[in-house]
Each structure stands twice: as C-alpha cells, then as structure tokens.
C-alpha cells in the first residue's frame, strides 16, 4: 500500500519507495502538524506569532499597492478570507510537492519543510510587533514538521517488514500514526485559536458600564422620516454586524479593557498616558457619524452609520498642549498599523473627533476596534479611523508617514460630496410608468442640501430629502420619475450644505477617493 519496488534491469536491488499517494499525504501531514503546533504555541505566547498568520501579514505589508487595491476592489470585505485561503492553497501544493520529491529518501522533503519553517521565522522576526519570545512558535513549527516527515517516512518504508511493533503490524502502526498526526494537527490548531485570546468577558463588562453611564452629550434622536428602508435604502443606523470592515488585520487583536492604555506624546507640552478606566472617567459623548472607506467606488457600499460613544479627542490634546507647528497626529494600533490625521481637523472646534469606546449601544465589537478606536467625522477612515489605538504621536507630515500614505494615497483624505442610487437596481426591469428612484448622499461635516436626478438626457429634477439628522451623517433621498418602455440611464448628483456641487469628473479611488456621478441602466417593461 505504501511502498513499491521496480525490478532492476541489472539485478541490482532497487531501494523501496513510497507510493505517490502516501508520499503526497506525508508532505501534507508534516506541514499540517507544523502549522498546528505553531498555532498552538502562538496561542500561548503571542497570537500574532503564528507562522500562518505572520506570513499572511507579511504578504499584506509587502504587496505592491496595485495588488492591494485590486484585492479590495475585487473581493471587498472578503479580501482577508481570500488571502488566507490563497496562502493555504499554496502551502497545500508545496506540501504535496515536498512529499512527492521524497519517495525514496526524506531529505528533499526535509529541505522544503525547513524552507517553509524559515519563512515562518522570517515573517515573525520582521513583524512590526516582534519580540524575542515570538520565535518560539515558528521554531516549534519547524521542528515539528521536520520530525513528523522523518518519522512517518521511515515507518512507511518499513511497512513490508515482517516485524511487529507492540502487537500490531508496522502497516497498521503507519495508518494509526498518520491518522494521529492529522487529528493532532487539527486539534492543536483549534486549541491555539481558542488560546489566542477571548476578550468577550471584558467587552461585556464595558457594555454594562456604558448601559449605566450618563453621557454628558447625547446624539440627536433619529426620526422615522430620516430613512426610506421600505424603498430599498439602508436603515439609518447600520447594525454592528453589517457595518463595513476594511483593515489589514488578518487576526483580530484580542485586547481587554484592563490591559489597554494610550500614550500621547511627541510635539506636546505634557505627555499623557491613559488607562481605560481613566478614559471612562472623562465626560462621555454620543455622536452619530457616517464613516466611509476611501476605496469605495462610485455607487459602492463601503459606507455605514453608527451611534458612537466616547471621549472628545480635542479636549485631551488641549490638555497635552499641541505645539503650533505640529500638523499631524500619527495614530498607531496594537498591531502597528498607522494613520496620519491632520491636526487642524482634530482640533477644529465642533468637529467632534472621538476616542470611541461604544457603538450602537454596546462596547465596540472586536473587529471594529475594541476597546478603543478613533473616529473623526469628515475624513476617510484610512486617515482617521484607527482601530485598537494605543499610541498618538503628535508630529508633522514631513517627519512621519503612515501605512496607506506609504502606498500612494494622499495624506489628508477629506470626504468628497457624493451620492448613491439604491433603487431601482442597475440592469433591473421596472414596470413602465412612475418609478421611485431613491438612495443616499453624504458630505461630512457640511451635510446635504440638495440631490438631483436625471433620466437619459432630460432635465435635472430635484429629489425629496429625508429629515436631516446632522451634517456628519448620510442623508436619504427619493424621487418619482416617469419611465417609458425601453432602456433608460438614470444618474444623480448631490450638493452639500456649503453649496458645493458634486463633481462630475470621474476618478478612481486612488489617491484620495473616487468621484463622478452614479449612474444605472434599467429597462422599463
């Protein structure tokens, strides 16, 4: 079953070799065991030191900007799943190859597994958050992979020997050993995932604290007239589970409120360090804010609105004493991602920048930054929405650069005046006659003053606006138009509260956000 021999042409004995099927399985089991043990040790030492996660993170850091943007455009919020799946497929193919080149002797497979292990070591060593103890996971993975390959290979080549081990044949021992390795790989990986940290207890405690807190400032009530969900627009507030997520974290940081702290330093008169309790002791403010990803295409869905609660960031920076020549606040997350926010925007009176601790009546979800994140109205998230924030360095754009700016995006990122058509859907076939066109528009912090709709080359028609909640949120709109049978092109444009008309100039998201009028094509029947 596991070994074959071929009659030698000269009568010289031919060394036994593994069948192709078992050789491939041997490679897969060796790599799987390595990944499982590495994940287990990482769960004990440091979740980010898992070789699988570390290599994925390295791919994210080193990928060229065009590839990163392609992934976000093509896969949206599933880009991380696609990346991890791709890494898994590559590892599977390499593992199969490692086994196939080791049918006679284990050395070629050992070399391949060792190279994979060293890549894991490199991924961990060159991670922004590297600590010497993090090497335990990739080193344990490397040792496990090599050991499993050698031992299963030796056992497989001896299955045809008549000797018995412990009362069972070597063939039975091979089958049992292979099964044990496979089950062990799954078990260790699963245990490592569980040990990687669970902040649910801490998050539940924060949710209870927020429920009992009395905000110093409450967000305005959202009236029913603020949205048209019955027409196909979103609900005004986006449920936490549906809130768009764009970040670079392959493994969500599992911070607890008890362990969190924030350092504010750099070009300030007084350095400030805050624990979570110290942050919560300050006045809590509720603010309803629409957030938008700079990668959002015209008409895209990377936009959401939530009721955030947190502490006013401007007041904290006023305490620190920001130097007049500091033009950037460089924020850093617990996994070393960085964003640069213009200082004058944060310090603008009434702007409402927050260190947020809650979202829609509960503590921040882990994937949205628990325990603390930044939220700055009017700026795209890549320069303002740092999740898991642990450091604020008051500096200048000249002195320090942030993650996405290093990859070709602009440094300031003000949100553009834009709108979107939600209904009817593009390429749909509504009934000819009166058809309701509806959607959303946004222009933080100025709000929306007008939305207009054009059918084919006709005149621009002013749409009805839903009740405005604040200038920091999106605004719904609707209009009934007459469609004759046949194909029609419908487009829309918005004007903000300062009288600025949305630009018709078509631009890609890079470097400072997409622009152009949203347009759909429908065929009335």
Image: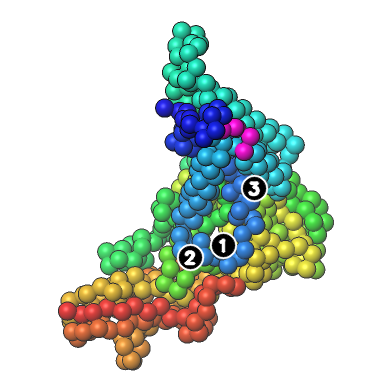
Residue at 36% x, 66% y: name it. 226
The quadrant of the image that shows the C terminus is: bottom left
Residue 124 at what x, y percent from top left? 68, 43
Q: Position of residue 32 (x, y in %)?
A: 52, 35
Tell me if 346 is positioned left or right of 473 in this view: right
- Residue position for label 2: 73
Depth check: give the residue in front, 6 or 219.
6
Query: Helix or strand or loop: what does disc 2 sit on?
Result: helix
Vertical order, 514 against 210 (above or below):
below
Which of the 4 image quarters holds residue 273? top right
- Please give left or right for residue 436 compared with residue 64 in the image: left
* CB-based contact (under 8 Å), mark 2 and mark 1: no
From this view, report whether residue 491 is shown above or below residue 216. Answer: below
Find the residue positioned furthest to the right: 269
Residue at label 3?
A: 335
- Residue at the farthest top position: 167
**What number is the disc on residue 68?**
1
Q: Which residues lie in the magenta part?
A: 104-108
Q: Secondary structure at mark 3?
A: loop
């Amino acid at each position: 079953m596991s070994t074959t021999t071929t009659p030698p042409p000269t009568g010289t004995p031919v060394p036994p070799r593994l069948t192709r099927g078992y050789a491939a399985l041997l490679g897969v089991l060796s790599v799987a065991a390595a990944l499982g043990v590495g994940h287990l040790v990482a769960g004990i030492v440091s979740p980010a030191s898992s070789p699988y996660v570390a290599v994925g993170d390295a791919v994210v850091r080193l990928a060229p900007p065009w590839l990163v943007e392609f992934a976000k455009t093509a896969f949206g919020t599933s880009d991380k799943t696609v990346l991890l799946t791709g890494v898994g497929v590559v590892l599977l193919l390499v593992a199969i190859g490692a086994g196939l080149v080791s049918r006679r002797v284990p050395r070629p497979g050992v070399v391949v597994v060792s190279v994979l292990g060293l890549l894991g070591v490199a991924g961990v060593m060159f991670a922004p958050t590297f600590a010497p103890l993090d090497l335990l996971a990739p080193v344990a993975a490397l040792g496990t992979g090599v050991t499993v390959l050698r031992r299963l290979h030796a056992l497989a080549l001896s299955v045809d020997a008549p000797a018995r081990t412990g009362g069972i044949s070597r063939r039975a021992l091979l089958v049992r050993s292979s099964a044990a390795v496979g089950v062990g790989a799954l078990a260790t990986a699963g245990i490592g995932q569980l040990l990687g940290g669970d902040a649910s207890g801490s998050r539940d405690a924060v949710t209870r604290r927020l429920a009992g807190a009395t905000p110093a400032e409450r967000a305005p009530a959202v009236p029913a007239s603020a949205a048209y969900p019955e027409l196909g627009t979103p609900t005004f507030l986006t449920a936490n589970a549906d809130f768009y997520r764009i970040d670079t974290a392959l493994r969500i940081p599992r911070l607890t409120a008890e362990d969190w702290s924030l350092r504010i330093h750099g070009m300030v008169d007084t350095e400030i360090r805050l624990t979570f309790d110290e942050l919560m002791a300050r006045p809590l403010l509720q603010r309803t804010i629409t957030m938008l990803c700079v990668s959002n295409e015209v008409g895209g869905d990377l936009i959401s609105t939530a009721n955030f609660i947190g502490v006013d960031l401007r007041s904290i920076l006023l305490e620190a004493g920001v130097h007049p020549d500091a033009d950037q606040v460089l924020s850093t997350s617990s996994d070393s991602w960085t964003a640069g926010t213009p200082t004058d925007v944060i310090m603008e009176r009434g702007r409402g920048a927050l260190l947020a601790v809650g979202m829609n009546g509960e503590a921040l979800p882990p994937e949205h930054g628990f325990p603390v994140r930044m939220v700055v109205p009017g700026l795209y998230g890549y320069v303002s929405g740092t999740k898991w924030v642990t450091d604020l360095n008051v500096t200048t754009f000249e002195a320090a650069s942030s993650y996405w700016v290093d990859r070709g995006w602009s440094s300031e990122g003000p949100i553009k005046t834009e709108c979107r058509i939600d209904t009817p859907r593009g390429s749909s076939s509504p009934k000819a006659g009166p058809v309701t066109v509806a959607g959303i528009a946004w222009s933080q912090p100025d709000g929306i003053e007008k939305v207009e709709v054009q059918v084919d080359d006709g005149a621009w028609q002013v749409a009805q606006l839903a009740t405005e909640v604040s200038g920091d949120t999106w605004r719904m709109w609707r209009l009934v138009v007459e469609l004759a049978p046949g194909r029609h092109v419908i487009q829309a444009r918005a004007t903000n509260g300062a009288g600025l008309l949305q630009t018709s100039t078509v631009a890609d998201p890079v470097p400072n956000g997409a622009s152009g009028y949203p347009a759909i094509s429908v065929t009335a029947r």
